Image (spheres, grey):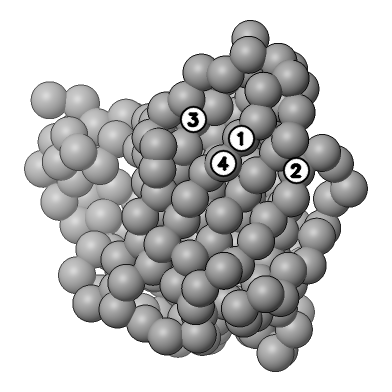
Amino acid sequence: SQTIHQWPATLVQPVGSPLSLECTVEGTSNPNLYWYRQAAGRGLQLLFYSVGIGQISSEVPQNLSASRPQDRQFILSSKKLLLSDSGFYLCAWRREETQYFGPGTRLLVL
Amino acid sequence: DAKTTQPTSMDCAEGRAANLPCNHSTISGNEYVYWYRQIHSQGPQYIIHGLKNNETNEMASLIITEDRKSSTLILPHATLRDTAVYYCIVRVAYSGAGSYQLTFGKGTKLSVIP
């Protein structure tokens, strides 16, 4: 069966510090991968998606970036965090018409 | 993608069936109905999806009206662990483009009461 992991589970970072969130998928190959952000009390915002190694598409221009160094690894990064980057970050993978989400990383920027 | 309307909140007694309605009167013929739920502080969990026919899996049943303008998610025997926000989403099938965003509305907050 397929599983999706995210870490860390929670993170508190100062403004201006760098960020690296990791997502890995097990039990499948060449998955489409997605990064979403969920702000408090709001819906999901698609940030990036990837259809393969090294292939990243951005949905929203911002100070975040994503990379896919391996088939089942998706990384979300920032060089300098902003207060507005606080939120719940979700990684997802797609099988046919369905997306499956990871447990999420809660980021608080102070 | 078609817009959905769900009640803001619902209560259900533990052990009873929870019936969560969703209206999607502008749904197109090629759009699926998806249900996800999100337990507090966790990632959304896929429950079930369907196009025209009723569907059932180990988690729930999905009843879609004949005109497809509304649907009901049924949790046959609700437990306390089913307390969550339930999202009804309508979306076309994946077409091969990488961007396949699911748009989550505000959902229905289901509270299962002992």
Q: Nearer the viewer, mark 2 or mark 4?
A: 4
Q: Nearer the viewer, mark 3 or mark 1?
A: 1
- Secondary element type, mark 4: strand
The residue shown at (74%, 50%) is A65
| Label 3 and label 1 in one chain | yes
Task: Please report contact status of discs 1 and 2: CB closer than 8 Å, yes or no.
Answer: yes
In the rendering, which numbered label is found on residue A64?
A: 2
Q: Position of residue B30 (x, y in %)?
A: 69, 87
Q: What's the chain of the residue with tag 2? A: A
Q: What's the chain of the residue with tag 4? A: A
The kind of residue tagged 3 is Arg
- Which residue ends up furthest to the top in the rendered image? A110
Can residue B92 be seen in the rendering of this structure?
no
Mark 3 and mark 4: span between their CA atoms?
13 Å
Mark 2 and mark 4: span between their CA atoms?
10 Å
In the rendering, which numbered label is found on residue A20?
A: 4
| Label 1 and label 2 in one chain | yes
Q: What's the chain of the residue with tag 3? A: A
